[in-house]
Image (tube, grey):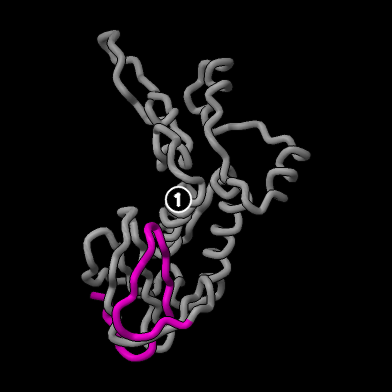
Amino acid sequence: ERQGGRIGRKRNADGSDSPYELNVNLFDALGDPDRAEPLARQVDRFVAAHAVMAALPGVPAIYLHSLLGSRGAPELVGRSGVPRAINREKLDETALLRELADADGRRARVLRGLRRLLRARRGRAAFHPSAPASVPDAPPGVFALRRGAGDEEVVCLHELAGAPAEVRLDAGGRDLLTGTRIEAGTVRLRPYQVLWLTMEGDAHPT
């Protein structure tokens, strides 16, 4: 509720109510409840969460309002009395296009980040739903995932604690998200930074 969400309840056979589901917009759920942190940090966290989903085995699904960086719509809950309406913001095309045209705004930043993830994994064998996956050791706060095998292997690094972290790579590679060359050795990750690396040789993040 501090994150702007609502608690859906169900009526029990004895007439009492129990929590049934949490209704909250994902951007709000992942954000600072005091809304005091910079927008860039909020967006980086939101994109990192989706990067984990997009890297895991399976077929990722992204809700339209997540793709567009929407916030919750508590006014719809108030009007309808339906807690799930928190995620059903009514979009106005003119206003939406104006917001997306603001490169530094929330919607444009989120859309840009999520499109980068989807483009990086598109057509790549390592991200096939049945491609091998394993979770190597990584420093605290970093979720590492190896996808694919051989020449198609990708090592995915996600900083999720919101603090700088150091990861050591035994071999260099190229970041699929930015095209940046990453050399072997110690790699310093920014808070909520994501690296998806095509690796050379048998690289192990440590």
Q: Label 1, on which residue?
A: 41
Instruction: Name the quadrant containing residue 203.
Output: bottom left
Q: Residues within 10 Å of mark 1 (few under 14, many from 20)?
A: some
Q: Residue at x 33, y 87 (%)?
A: 171
Taking the image as shown, residue 19 lies to the left or right of residue 42, namely left
Nearer to the camera, 22 or 30 = 30
Residue 20 within the segment the image draws in magenta: no
Residue 22, placed above or below residue 172: above
Residue drawn at (27%, 78%) of the image: 168
Q: Nearer the viewer, residue 164 or 71?
A: 164
**Residue occupying image coordinates x 47% and y 76%:** 175
Residue that protrudes farthest toward the right in the picture: 94
> Residue 17 appears at what percent x and percent y?
31, 14
Q: Amino acid at mark 1?
A: Arg
Q: Residue 56 placed where, x, y %?
A: 38, 63
Q: Secondary structure at mark 1?
A: helix
Q: Position of residue 75 (x, y in %)?
A: 57, 21
**Which residue is farthest top?**
15
In the image, taking residue 159 as reference, residue 48 lies left or right, namely: right
- What residue appears at the point 45 percent right and 71 percent down from the top-left corner? 127
